[in-house]
Amino acid sequence: MLFDWAAQPFHTLLITFVFARYFAAEVAPDPATGQIWWGYMLAVTGIFIAILSPILGSIADATGPRKPWIAGFVILTALGAGFLWWAVPGGGGVTFWVLVAFGVGMTGMEFASVFNNAIMPDLVPRETLGRLSGSAWALGYVGGLLALIIVLAAMVESSPGSGHTLLGIAPVLGLDAVVHGGERAAGPFTALWIVVFIIPFFLFTPDTVRRARIDGAIRSGLADLFETIRDLPKNRSLFAYLGSSMFYRDALNGLFGFGGIYAGGVLKWEATQLGLFGILAAITGIIGALYGGRMDDQLGPKRVVTGSIVILIIVSAIIITTDRETLLLMPVEAMPGPFAAPDILFYICGGLIGAAGGSLQAASRTLMVDQASGGNMTKAFGLYALSGKATSFIAPVLVALFTGVIGQQLLGLSDSAAQRFGISPLILLFVIGLILLRWVKQHQES
């Protein structure tokens, strides 16, 4: 569970609520261009993760221990996150390397999660696995929430030119608000967080015993992987679930990955407003993960996943039909934030995204366990990562294409309208994932 506590700030601070918005608003030439660049970076990173995740999982299943892999990938995550300090406003000639560093950190985080997920089923009986997964996600949200509060309260200027944070103090450590020191420092802060809080995981979590030498394991692991992929159509439930999760998790990651950029460009939110949005989403995420985990044990993970996707489809439709002058496609008088009608509606949507996203991610892990066979859990979660990343380039590429090529160039939309239009493909991805769930079996149906 403490793995999720250590890992979540990478997603909360860097992907969703602080750094991504800062990159698009201040490092890139303009928010729409930032959304396009961010989309292509996520796409390239996703392809790389998709190719290697199942291969590494198969090798790990053949050799045994997973902790050494996790340690290496945590170091990679910390290095990538730490480099983000050099993401100065305007790019300063390092914009490309900032995107590369973020991709490296994200790769390390995703690979570490593959091996952590594979350890989980060995720790508790299947009947309580939903509660463990949900509680772990909830604890992760608590960690992300605490990290976000620390950054907003002590490091980031509450509003441009104010000179103080939400606590009314000057940013700590002499962080210069003029060059957005607080937003940039979120990277090194995240790196320090994961390195410190991952220690209990290494000290106390049991690991699998070593089974084979690494050289022979590579050959046998790859052979086993290719055989599994070849035989996937014979296992209709696993095949359908990998396909379903391929689309709905891609859509969810799209909401998380572009949420901050979207709010900054469409609603003109500053870091503090987005941070409050993040705090609300984290709190509801804790509730959603805890409640979803218990519903998982009672009703099965498939029903939890289905209900969560339906909520996210509705919320996505609300988001793309609302901006500063429009509320659910109805024109409204433009009002300054932070508590005009569009802002309030976005805060409500943030709470729903947190709750549904928390329960969806927790239940998805246990539903994957139901599809996996005992001795190949890491390979199974490698395939799970593959299904989540094989099309992970689709959501970012679609967002980038719908924002830039179609929205701005072909339709001539304004930057704000193009950003709204760019998010719309995520709804289709959720719908495809929902349809494919029809052929998935859970533990109670096996």
Image (tube, rainbow, N blue to C red):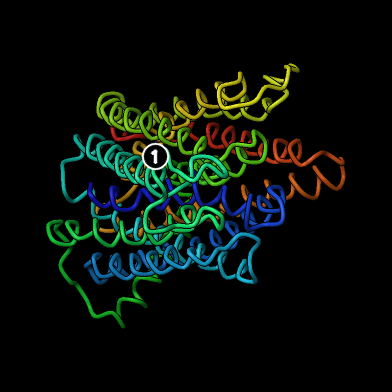
Q: Tell me the residue at 50%/60% (across/down).
A: 50
Question: Which quarter of the figure has residue 43?
Answer: bottom right
Q: Is residue 286 above or below residue 72?
A: above
Instruction: Report x, y in % for residue 217.
Output: 30, 76
Instruction: Report x, y in % for residue 387.
Output: 49, 51
Q: Is residue 298 above or below residue 19?
A: above
Q: Is residue 60 visible?
A: yes
SS of the residue at dot 1? helix
Q: Nearer the viewer, residue 301 or 175?
A: 175
Quarter containing the C terminus? top left
Instruction: Report x, y in % for residue 41.
Output: 60, 60
Q: Tell me the residue at 35%/28% (across/down).
A: 288
Q: Which residue is mark 1?
A: 361
- Crowding at label 1, few (<14), some or many (≥20) Cα neighbours within 10 Å? many
Question: Which quarter of the figure has residue 136?
Answer: top left
Q: Nearer the viewer, residue 132 or 109?
A: 109
Q: Nearer the viewer, residue 437 or 339?
A: 339
Q: Nearer the viewer, residue 330 or 249?
A: 330
Q: Amino acid at mark 1?
A: Gln
Q: Tell me the residue at 64%/35% (across/down).
A: 428
Instruction: Report x, y in % for residue 384.
Output: 42, 52
Q: Is residue 251 visible?
A: no
